[in-house]
Each structure stands twice: as structure tokens, then as C-alpha cells.
Image (cartoon, helix red, strand yellow):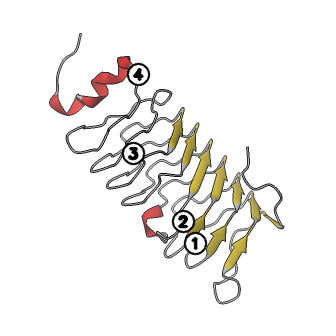
């Protein structure tokens, strides 16, 4: 379900975008089947990326405001390099392995049906974000605010309650052991 109701421009099958000196702003744009390696110094506002590959893409000083990624590959993308102001992203059916959200405020963000192996959420604020049916194998949670997040449909996470904020975090009772993995306790 796209949050962008009607794009003003559709950009398909691109391998590069114009340099910021030629075009800096993309508003209400839909990107389809693009393979991009550098989106640095660009502004994306109310945009959707569908079936795009942004793996290891550079995102230095990039503005991502109300940007949705659907069926995209974002392997190793360092979102922490993007601008903090108005940062708001949505992911559905995406591959986010090795991506980094270090120190990002993500409390309006949504992650739905995503594979997120070894994603870095160190010092990120995930409070009130949505995470539905995500595979969080080896995801890094350190000094992460997980207050109020619902992880009942997600899997493979390990969260240390001593170094993360987990007030009102929802997990299934059978996943309680995931809060104790650091202590090497055997639960039978």
C-alpha cells in the first residue's frame, strides 16, 4: 500500500540521477526498477521507490522525508549518513541486510515483511515505529529505544534489556528468552 497517492513524475530504469547541481529536489516522484549507487546531497520528499536496488548506495547528506521503499534491495545502505531533519521512511518487502540506522530517529517509520539481517540500530529511536513480520537475525540493538514497539510477528531478534529501553515493548511469551541471550542461560 503506497502512501504516495498520485506521483507527479515516474522515473524508470535509471542507473544514475542528475548531479545535485542539475537537480536537487524530487517531490512526489515514483522510482521504478532503478539501480542507484549514489543519492548524496539530494532531497526526496513524498517519494516511492519500487523494485529498486540501492545496495551500498551512498546517501551522504540526503533528505528522506516520507519516503517509501517497496520490494527494494537496500543491502548495506548507511541511512545514518542521511539528514536527520524530517527523516521518515517506510519499508515493505525489502532486503535491508547490513543497513545502518545508527542514531536515527525512526519513531514514525514502518518495516513490513522485511529481511533485516545484521541491521545496525545502535542508539536509534524505534519507539512507536511499526515492525511487522520482519526477520531480525543478528540485528544490533545497543542503547536503542524500543519503547512501545510490537515485535510479536517478527523473528530472530535478540535484545539486551540492560542496554536498551524496552518499556511496553510487545513480544510473544515464547520469545522471552530473546531478552536473556546475553546471559547464556539455558531455558528448558
- Distance of mark 3 from mark 4, alpha carbons? 22 Å
Tag 2 and tag 3, C-beta contact below 8 Å: no
* Residue located at (56% from left, 79% from top): 41
- Quadrant including the N terminus: top right
At mark 4, the secondary structure is loop
Judging by the rendered image, the residue that carries numbered circle 3 is: 118
Q: Is residue 141 left or right of residue 85?
A: left
Q: Along the polypeptide, which appears first: circle 2 or circle 3?
A: 2
- Secondary element under disc 1, as helix, strand or loop, is loop
In-front residue for pair 79/72: 79
| Chain-order first, disc 1 or disc 3 | 1
**Quadrant of the image occupied by residue 167:** top left
Alpha carbon separation for disc pair 2 and 3: 17 Å
Q: Is residue 156 left or right of residue 123?
A: right
Provide the secondary structure element on which disc 2 rests: loop
Which numbered tag is attached to residue 57? 2
Question: In the rendered structure, which disc, 3 or 4, sits on the residue that comes first in sequence?
Answer: 3
Q: Is residue 20 visible?
A: yes
Q: Is residue 106 above or below residue 87?
A: above
Residue at the spot of label 4 = 172
Picture coordinates of residue 58, whole percent (x, y): 52, 70
Residue at image mark 1: 38
- Within 10 Å of disc 1 (Cα), the crowding (few <14, some 14-19, many 20+) is some
Where is residue 186? Give x, y as percent. Answer: 19, 17
Please name which of the two marks, 1 or 4, marks the residue nearer to the observer: 4
Q: Quadrant of the C terminus?
A: top left
- Front in this rendered view, residue 90 or 95: 90
| Callouts 4 and 2 close, C-beta under 8 Å | no
Amino acid at each position: 500500500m503506497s502512501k504516495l497517492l498520485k506521483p507527479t513524475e515516474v522515473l524508470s530504469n535509471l542507473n544514475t540521477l542528475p548531479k545535485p547541481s542539475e537537480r536537487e529536489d524530487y517531490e512526489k516522484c515514483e522510482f521504478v526498477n532503478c539501480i542507484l549507487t549514489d543519492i548524496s546531497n539530494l532531497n526526496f520528499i513524498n517519494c516511492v521507490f519500487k523494485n529498486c536496488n540501492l545496495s551500498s548506495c551512498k546517501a551522504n547528506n540526503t533528505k528522506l522525508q516520507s519516503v517509501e521503499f517497496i520490494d527494494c534491495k537496500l543491502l548495506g545502505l548507511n541511512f545514518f549518513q542521511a539528514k536527520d531533519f524530517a527523516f521518515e521512511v517506510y519499508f515493505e518487502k525489502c532486503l535491508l541486510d547490513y543497513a545502518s540506522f545508527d542514531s536515527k530517529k525512526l519513531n514514525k517509520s514502518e518495516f513490513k515483511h522485511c529481511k533485516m539481517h545484521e541491521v545496525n540500530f545502535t542508539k536509534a529511536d524505534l519507539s512507536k515505529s511499526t515492525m511487522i513480520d520482519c526477520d531480525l537475525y543478528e540485528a544490533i540493538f545497543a542503547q536503542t529505544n524500543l519503547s512501545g514497539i510490537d515485535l510479536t510477528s517478527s523473528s530472530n531478534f535478540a535484545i539486551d534489556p540492560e542496554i536498551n529501553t524496552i518499556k511496553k515493548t510487545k513480544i510473544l511469551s515464547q520469545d522471552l528468552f530473546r531478552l536473556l541471550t546475553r546471559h547464556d542461560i539455558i531455558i528448558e
